[in-house]
Image (cartoon, rainbow, N blue to C red):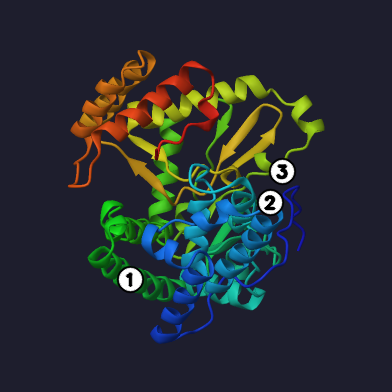
């Protein structure tokens, strides 16, 4: 069926959906994972710190194992791995590199499964909606996969199809993670300091929103309106009549992930104007609109041509209230003036300090951030710090 795209086909690896497993088995698998990658240090500190003391080759081998194990455990842990893949403040480069492949290296669903989901959700045979529907996906991720198709009116579209049963798998896994986090908070100071249960609850809320493709369709409409002034940035429009909670049909965008662009293409693209608009667009999202792309990893930014990029995968969006945006804006001159004391004061106005809060340590870290911003080392700055 004849739609072609320059987007590269996904590599074949291990399945993206977790095999059926009872709670006891999932507990066993999670415990094995925790102790395999750090033993007591994982449990006591909730970090993968054991990676840091090994040789480069040992770290790389363990990182590959970790990525494979997360894929084997299924979508919940793949999403956690995706989050960790952006945390250069916590993990060494070899680990980040291996975890980054979790962003799109997942074995596709069989074509008959995709067809069943689409027809069930849209309520009609697939050939009554599409002139053509490519069986081979153009992208396969932990929650679903994307297929190129052509509507009966001739429009080219991308159809995102959710993996069947994934909501139940994630609900079970998150429930187990929450029980584990409560157990750790009762027994370890580190878990209480990092408020692990609250983190799991936030992760659960984000996953619930991301699994509802109708929410993503509305996110696309709103972000497209908000970024209309940026002519170099493309946000695909959803096709509303063919969107449900488990199927999302949208305008087709041809391109390549920015992370996969080679030197030849880089030399021929208008890099500076594109980067300028991306920066301004993100600042507008955060400080003006209070509605921003919360998952902007390289796999979600496509180079459409030498002058345009597209923002994809808008299931995870963040929202900032007006008062919070004003406080964040006040933080910028404090950083510019290298005023760590003011940065700490503003942080305490934005969030609540728990009983383990160390003001002196936060001030020291903010001073480092301010210094890095003045010396041009912004690439190394992590907001989480």
Residue positioned 76% across, 53% down in the render: 4
Q: Which residue is mark 1?
A: 180
Which numbered tag is attached to residue 156? none
Circle on res. 260 = 3
Find the distance from the CA under tag 3 to the CA under tag 2.
24 Å
Viewer-nearest of labels 3 and 2?
A: 2
Nearer mark to the viewer, of 2 and 1: 2
Residue drawn where x is 60% and y is 63% of the image:
67
Along the horizontal axis of the image, is 371 left or right of 146?
left
Q: Please give the residue where the numbered disc 2 appears in the rendered image.
A: 56
Left or right: 125, with 364 as reference point? right
Q: Is residue 198 above or below residue 346?
A: below
Q: Residue at x 62, y 59 (%)?
A: 63
Of label 1 and label 3, which has the lower sequence position? 1
Q: CA distance from mark 1 to mark 3?
A: 38 Å
Residue 248 makes an appearance in the image: no
Q: Residues within 10 Å of mark 1 (few under 14, many from 20)?
A: some
How many marks the image carries: the answer is: 3
Decide: marks 2, 1 in contact (CB < 8 A)? Answer: no
Q: Residue at x 56, y 51 (%)?
A: 52
Q: Quadrant of the C terminus?
A: top left
Does residue 355 lie above or below 62 as drawn? above
Q: Secondary structure at mark 2?
A: helix
| Depth order, front residue of 371/352 | 371
**Residue 257 vertical position relative to residue 77 in the rendered view, above or below:** above
């Amino acid at each position: 069926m004849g739609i072609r795209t320059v987007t590269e086909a996904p590599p074949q690896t291990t399945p993206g959906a977790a095999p059926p497993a009872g709670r006891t088995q999932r507990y066993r698998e999670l415990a094995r994972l925790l102790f395999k990658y750090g033993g007591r240090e994982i449990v006591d500190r909730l970090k993968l710190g054991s990676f840091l003391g090994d040789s480069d080759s040992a770290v790389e081998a363990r990182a590959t194992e970790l990525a494979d194990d997360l894929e084997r455990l299924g979508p919940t842990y793949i999403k956690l791995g995706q989050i960790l893949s952006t945390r250069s403040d916590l993990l060494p480069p070899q680990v980040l590199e291996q975890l980054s492949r979790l962003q799109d290296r997942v074995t596709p669903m069989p074509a008959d499964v995709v067809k069943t989901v689409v027809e069930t959700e849209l309520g009609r045979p697939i050939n009554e909606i599409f002139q053509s529907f490519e069986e081979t996906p153009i992208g396969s991720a932990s929650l679903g996969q994307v297929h190129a198709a052509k509507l009966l009116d001739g429009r080219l579209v991308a159809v995102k199809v959710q993996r069947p049963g994934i909501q139940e798998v994630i609900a079970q896994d998150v429930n187990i993670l929450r029980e584990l986090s409560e157990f750790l908070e009762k027994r370890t100071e580190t878990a209480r300091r990092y408020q692990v249960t609250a983190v799991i609850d936030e992760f659960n809320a984000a996953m619930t929103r991301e699994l509802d493709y109708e929410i993503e369709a509305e996110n696309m409409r709103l972000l497209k309106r908000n970024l209309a002034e940026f002519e170099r940035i493309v946000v695909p429009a959803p096709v509303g009549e063919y969107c449900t909670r488990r199927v999302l049909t949208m305008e087709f965008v041809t391109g390549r992930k920015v992370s996969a662009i080679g030197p030849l293409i880089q030399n021929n693209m208008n890099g500076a104007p594109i980067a300028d608009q991306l920066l301004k667009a993100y600042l507008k999202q955060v400080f003006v609109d209070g509605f921003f792309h919360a998952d902007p990893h390289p796999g979600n930014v496509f180079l459409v041509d030498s002058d345009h990029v597209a923002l994809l995968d808008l299931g995870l969006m963040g929202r900032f209230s007006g008062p919070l945006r004003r406080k964040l804006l006040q933080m910028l001159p404090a950083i510019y003036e290298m005023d760590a004391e003011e940065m700490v004061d503003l942080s305490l106005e934005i969030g609540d300090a728990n009983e383990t809060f160390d003001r002196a340590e936060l001030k020291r870290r903010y001073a480092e951030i301010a210094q890095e911003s003045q010396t041009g080392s912004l690439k190394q700055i992590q907001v989480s710090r």
